[in-house]
């Protein structure tokens, strides 16, 4: 069965420092991978997605992620964190078995705190 | 374009009651998915509707049901509410793929349901 693991429940970084949030997935075929961000009381906003092609994908707000098939990972990175980046981040895999579906399987999330 | 809208934003019910939540997708989007978010279970897929048909279903009891109308608007219903149904219910819409794969989904702000 498909699954997503985010090993870090909570991360604290200083403003201006670099950030890497880890995501590992379990999926038999080429996965559809997503990173979403959720601010308190809000819905989910898509940061970036990987469907195929270049394994380094750029997203909004200066985020990027790298798909590594050999490690079953899709880690999210940002070179310099801003205080407004404090939020919860979710990695998700699209659970397609070849047919059309929009079912997403989410990781448990990583709560990011930013210190001034 | 207006985003995904969900009504109501907040709802308080008592055990045993039933509730109906509404979701209006982005104009032109034909697929609507529903997710439940709780602190204990995280984000879990409920079901997806496309062209008024349920295309995929998560692992939830039959008390949870949904439907989609010809204008792509969707409703979900929970009957015989339990305390454990307290959650943020998120709706997501997407353009529907003709072939296989997973679309990019756009989430609404959610409906916060509290069951007393």
Image (tube, rainbow, N blue to C red):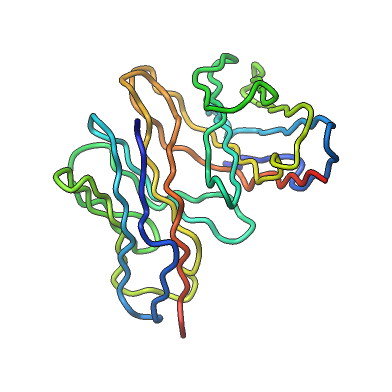
Q: Give me the residue at 35% from left, 18% from top.
A: A99
The percent position of residue B73, horizontal first and vertical second, equals 65, 26
Q: Residue furthest left?
A: A70
Q: In the figure, residue B97 lies in which quadrant?
A: top left
For the point 32% across and 52% down, which residue is it? A23
Indicate the position of residue A28 as horizontal and vertical percent values: 24, 30
State left or right for residue B13 relative to residue A111.
Answer: right
Note whether B9 is above or below A42 in the view shown. Answer: above
Indicate the position of residue A51 as horizontal and vertical percent values: 28, 37
Instruction: Report the label total.
Output: 0
**Which quarter shows the N terminus of chain A?**
top left
Question: With B66 as the anchor, is A71 left or right in this view?
Answer: left
Q: Height in image: A73 above or below A7?
A: above
Q: Position of residue B47 (x, y in %)?
A: 55, 26
**B11 vs B73, nearest the viewer:** B11
Q: Is residue B13 left or right of residue A94?
A: right
Quarter-of-image position of residue B80: top right
Residue placed farthest to the bottom in the image?
A116
Q: Residue at x 56, y 60 (%)?
A: A39
**In-front residue for pair B42/A69:** B42
């Amino acid at each position: 069965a498909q699954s997503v693991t985010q090993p870090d429940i909570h991360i604290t970084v200083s403003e201006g420092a670099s950030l890497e949030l880890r995501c590992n997935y379990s999926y038999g075929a080429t996965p559809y991978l997503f990173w979403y961000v959720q601010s308190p009381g809000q819905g989910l906003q898509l940061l970036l997605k990987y469907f195929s092609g270049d394994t380094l994908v750029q997203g909004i707000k200066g985020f990027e992620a790298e798909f590594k098939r050999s490690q079953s990972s899709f880690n999210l990175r940002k070179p310099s964190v801003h205080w407004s980046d404090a939020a919860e981040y979710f990695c998700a895999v699209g659970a397609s078995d070849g047919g059309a579906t929009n079912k997403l399987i989410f990781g448990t999330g990583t709560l990011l705190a930013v210190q001034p | 374009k207006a985003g995904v809208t969900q009504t109501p934003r907040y709802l308080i019910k008592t055990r045993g009651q039933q509730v109906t939540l509404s979701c209006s997708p982005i104009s032109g989007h034909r697929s609507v998915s529903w997710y439940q978010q709780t602190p204990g279970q995280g984000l879990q897929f409920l079901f997806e509707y496309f062209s008024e048909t349920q295309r995929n279903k998560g692992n939830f009891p039959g008390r949870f049901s949904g439907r989609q109308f010809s204008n792509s608007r969707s409703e979900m219903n929970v009957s015989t509410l339990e305390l454990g149904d307290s959650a943020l219910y998120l709706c997501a819409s997407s353009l529907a793929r003709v072939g296989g794969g997973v679309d990019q989904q756009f989430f609404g702000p959610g409906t916060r349901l509290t069951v007393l």
